[in-house]
Amino acid sequence: MTAVDYSASAARRPIGQTGFWAAVRARIDAYRTYQSLDKLTDQQLEDVGLTRGDIARVAYGR
């Protein structure tokens, strides 16, 4: 018989994305977010309510 995990964390976790590979994928996504935000002009960042200093915090959650 197969056990099914109905916990909230399991619901948020994509199938096959656990442990090491999930961390690698999250880091790649954060890097891509950083690169995308860094390409915006100061005016575009201001339009979405950000400054240059916010980019790392938004991308990497710092």
Image (spheres, rainbow, N blue to C red):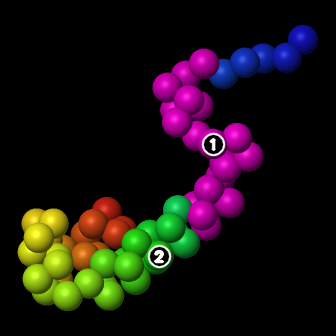
Residue 34, horizontal then vertical, whole percent: 37, 78
In the image, what residue occupies the spot 59% across and 31% down?
10
Does residue 62 appear to the left or right of 51 in the view shown? Answer: right
Q: Is residue 41 above or below residue 14?
A: below
Drawn side of residue 1 relative to residue 13, left or right: right
Q: Callout 1: 10 Å neighbours few (<14), some, many (20+)?
A: few
Judge by depth and name the residue closer to the eye, 36 or 23: 36
Q: Is residue 45 above or below residue 48?
A: below
Provide the residue designation for mark 2.
Answer: 32
Res. 53 in view: no
Q: Main secondary structure of the magenta part?
A: helix
Judged from this view, the residue extending furthest toward the right is 1
Check the picture and name the quadrant holding the N terminus: top right
- Total labels: the figure holds 2
What residue appears at the point 15 percent right and 66 percent down from the top-left corner? Answer: 48
The vertical placement of 52 against 47, above or below, is below
For residue 4, the mark is none
Which comes sooner in the sequence, label 1 or label 2?
A: 1
Circle 1: residue type = Pro
Q: Residue at x 32, y 87 (%)?
A: 39
Residue 32 image offset from top left, x and y in percent? 47, 76
Q: Is residue 12 magenta?
A: yes
Question: Magenta region: which residues?
Answer: 6-25
Looking at the rendered structure, the secondary structure element under dot 2 is helix
Q: Secondary structure at mark 1?
A: loop
Q: Is residue 47 visible?
A: yes
Instruction: Locate residue 36 relative to residue 29 in the image: left or right.
Output: left
| In this view, 43 is above or below 11 | below
Q: Which residue is mark 1?
A: 14
